[in-house]
Image (spheres, helix red, strand yellow):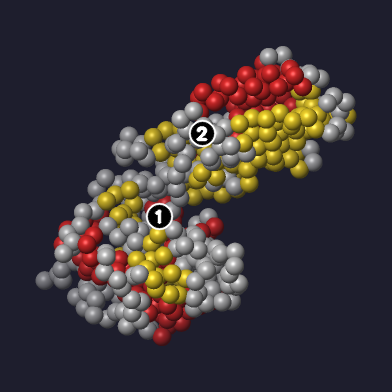
Amino acid sequence: MEMRNRRAVLMEFDLSKPQCYWFKKISEIPRGSRNEKAVSDFVVKFAEERNLKVKQDAAWNVIVDKPGSPGHEYDPVLILQAHMDMVCEKTSDSDHDFEKDPLDLYVEKGWLHARGTTLGGDDGNGVAYMLAVLDDDTLVHPPLECMFTTAEEIGLVGAQKLVPEDLHGDRLISLDGGGEHVTGLSSSGAATIHMSYEMKMEPASDPAYELYVYGLKGGHSAAMIDRERANALKLAARILEEAEGRGISLHLVSLDGGRKDNAITRESRILFTSSASYAELESSVKQSAAGIHEELQYSDEGFAAELKQKDPVSEQADGDSSAELLDFLYLIPDGFQHKSMAIPGLTLTSLNLGILYTDGNKAEMQILARSAIDSALDHMIGQVKKLSQYMGVQVQILGRYKGWNYKEDSDLRKKFAMVLEKHGEKLECHASHGGLECGIFSGMRPGIDIITFGPICLDVHSPEERLDLASFDRSYEMLREMITACAEQESN
C-alpha cells in the first residue's frame, strides 16, 4: 500500500515506541530559546548513563559519540544533528508558562498537538530521533556523532558557537527537515548590516508633514523576496526623492518603519518640513503613487501613500543631512538580486532593508543580506559599505554565517532516494533562500555531504502546530534504514 494512502490511518501516541517515548520526555522540559540548560543537562545525563562519550559547551550544545556497531567500528563517522530549542507561542486564553510548565500533549485524529501552545516538533522530532537511535543497541550503524544544538530559532546561535574540531565526519543528516520524503539542497548564508547616520539639526519654522506608506503585503525576507513585494521604506524615500526632483525643498525630522530585518517592511512614516504648500506636496505624492500603483498592480496591489499635515516641530535636519540620508535610502540596494541558474526558482542573493528608526538626531538602519555563496555576500556588503562611505553613514557587521551551497553529487541524497524507493516514494528536493545550521556546518567542514530529513509537521511556530504520528513512525524507520545504509561492509 502506498504511503499516501497509509496517511489516512489514525495513530495513537504509543509510548512503547522509542521515538514517542523520548518526544514525551523532552516535552516535559521547558526548552524555549535561551532556556535550554535543563534539556541540555538531560541529554548529558542520558549519555553518561549509557557510558557514551559526551561534550557540553558553554552555549549548552551537546555532542554525543556512539562507537560503530560490531564490524563497523572503523567506518567513516556519520553525524546526526537537531536543535533542542523551540519557538514558544500560545493562544490568547492559555495560561501556559514556557519557563516552567511541561507541554500538555494530546492526540486528535492521528495528529499530536500541545494544548494551547506550540508543539516543539521543530525540532523536538529530531532530538527524539537521536535519543532513540543512541538508545538502540540492535541498529547496525557506523560511528555516530549526535549534535544537539541550541538557540537555532533566534539566529542559529548555538551552532555558531561550535568549532571545526567538534565535527569528525564528512556526512551529516540534519533532522531539522520535514515532509518525510523531502530533503534540502542548499540554504543561504547571511550578514546583518547595521548602519547609523547622525543628522545635523537646526531650528525649524516651515510646516510639518508626514508621509505614510502602507497597505503592502510584506512577508518573510527569504521566502517572499522574489515575489516583487515592495519595501515601504524604499517607497517612502522614492516618493520624497521624486518630490525634490520636482523642485520641492524639504527637511527630514524623523523616520520610522520596520522592526525585523527578516521581514519585508509593510509600513513606513517619514516626518518632514517643507516650505511648499500642502496642495503642491499632495500633487507630487499622488503623481509618484500613480506610477508605483501601476508597477505593483500584480504584486502589491494594496499599496497606498498618504500625506498628512502635522503639528509644528522645533527641529529639523539641515539641508545637507536631509539630502544625504534621503539619497542613501533611495540608492541603497534592496530586494531580490540574482537567481540560481542550477536550481530553478531559487533566489541566490537578496538584501532586505528591514529596520529604520530615528533616536534623537540619529537614524538607525539595518539590512539582512543573504546568499549561499560567500563571494556574492561579500559583494553586497561591499556595495553597502561603499555607498555608506560616500554618504557619511557608519556601518557595522553585527553577525554573519555561511551558506550551504548546492552539491550536485551527494551520496547521502542517493541513499535517501533508495530508501524511499523501497517504500514506494520518490525523493523531492527543495532549496531554501533562508538560513539553516547546515550552512554553518558546511563552512566548518568544506565538502561535507548534507541532507535534511524529518516527518510531516504542519503550522510550526504557531499554537496550531501538529505532528502526523503515522509520518513520525515511518520517518523514524526510514532514518534507521538510512543509518544502516551508511554502514560500510566489514573489511575482509
Mark pair 2, 1: CA separation: 33 Å
Q: Is the residue 27 above or below the residue 294 in the image?
A: below
- Residue at the image position 49 percent from the left and 76 percent from the top: 104
Image quarter in which the N terminus is found = bottom left
Q: In the rendering, which numbered label is found on residue 200?
A: none
Name the residue that disc number 1 marks. Answer: 438
Residue 433 on image: x %, y %: 42, 44
Toward which corner of the image does residue 123 lie, by quadrant? bottom left
- Residue shown at 18% from the left, 61% from the top: 2
Amino acid identity at mark 2 = Asp
Q: Residue at x 50, y 60 (%)?
A: 462
Q: Is residue 194 visible?
A: no
Q: Which quadrant of the rendered structure holds the C terminus?
A: bottom left
Q: Position of residue 126 (x, y in %)?
A: 38, 67
* Residue hosting label 2: 300
Compared to 354, does 24 lie above or below? below
